[in-house]
């Protein structure tokens, strides 16, 4: 007898091994650190329409995590940064 997975309709994102997924305080954007193309990728995605805002690549994981934290800080600002 086949059983449906309890997580089948769960739209929550799970990071790849040793990856990180962060959301801003408003819950409007998601910042993910994952392994891609033999490098660490930082991807910022809008949750509302699942649109990729930006993607950046780093050779070291700690650099990617630091940049992801910077993106979350920018997204949490009450006013947009200059030039946005």
Image (cartoon, grey):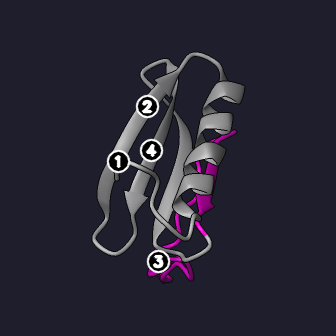
Vertically, is 36 above or below 50? above
Measured Cα–Cα span from mark 3 to mark 2: 30 Å
Does the CB distance between marks 3 and 2 fall below 8 Å? Answer: no
Would residue 4 appear left or right of 47 to someone viewing this image?
right
Q: In which quarter of the image is residue 51?
A: bottom left
What residue is shown with label 2?
Answer: 56
What residue is shown with label 3?
Answer: 8
What residue is shown with label 4?
Answer: 43
Q: Mark 1 or mark 4, which has the lower sequence index?
A: 4
Measured Cα–Cα span from mark 1 to mark 2: 19 Å
Measured Cα–Cα span from mark 1 to mark 3: 41 Å
Q: Quadrant of residue 18?
A: top right
Would residue 76 appear left or right of 83 to someone viewing this image?
right
Q: Residue 26 carries which label?
A: none
The residue sitting at 42% across, 50% down in the picture is: 82
Vertically, is 14 above or below 32? below
Check if residue 38 falls in the magenta segment: no
């Amino acid at each position: 007898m086949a059983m449906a997975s309890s997580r089948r309709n769960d739209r929550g994102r799970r990071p790849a091994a040793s990856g990180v997924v962060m959301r801003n305080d408003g819950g409007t954007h998601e910042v993910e650190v994952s392994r891609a193309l033999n490098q660490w990728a930082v991807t910022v995605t809008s949750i509302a329409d699942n649109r990729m805002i930006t993607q950046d690549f780093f050779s070291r994981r700690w650099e990617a995590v630091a940049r992801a934290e910077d993106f979350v800080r920018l997204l949490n600002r009450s006013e947009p940064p200059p030039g946005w």
